[in-house]
Amino acid sequence: MDPFSVVVEEDDDAGERLADGVGSLSSGTFRAFVVALLLAQAGLFAASLGLLLGWFRAQWLLGGALFIGGIVALAATVGIVRWHARQS
């Protein structure tokens, strides 16, 4: 049995379909998605780093500030998603 025989051939026009899909979004939807994506990434990073600093290095002041900042960023992400859902 050839292991490569089960691999599905890629679509030749997948890039074009993706560009058409992104191009059909409204600018508000696209901006909300990008901001929510960046806030979620920053929030997860800050909250995780804050917990690590507090637990392993006993730097509770800096770690606590990072953790709280990360939680605020994640809450802002939830707020953006809910606001956008109400607008749609």
Image: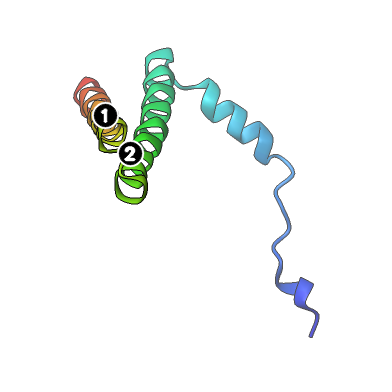
State the image coordinates of residue 65 (x, y, percent, origin top left).
26, 29
Q: Residue furthest right?
A: 2
Given contact means CB atoms under 8 Å apart, are the residues at marks 1 and 2 in contact?
yes
Tell which circle, 1 or 2, labels the residue nearer the N-terminal end. 2
Task: Give the residue at x 54% y 21%.
Answer: 23
Residue 62, located in which quarter of the rendered image?
Answer: top left
12 to 17, vertically: above or below = below
Q: Residue furthest front?
A: 58
The amino acid on which the numbered mark 1 sits, given as a three-letter code, is Ala
The residue that disc 2 covers is 50
Is 22 or 44 nearer to us in this picture? 44
Residue 19, located in which quarter of the rendered image?
Answer: top right
Is 49 or 82 nearer to us in this picture? 49
Coloring applied to the structure? rainbow
The residue that disc 1 covers is 65
Task: Give the residue at x 30% y 49%.
Answer: 55
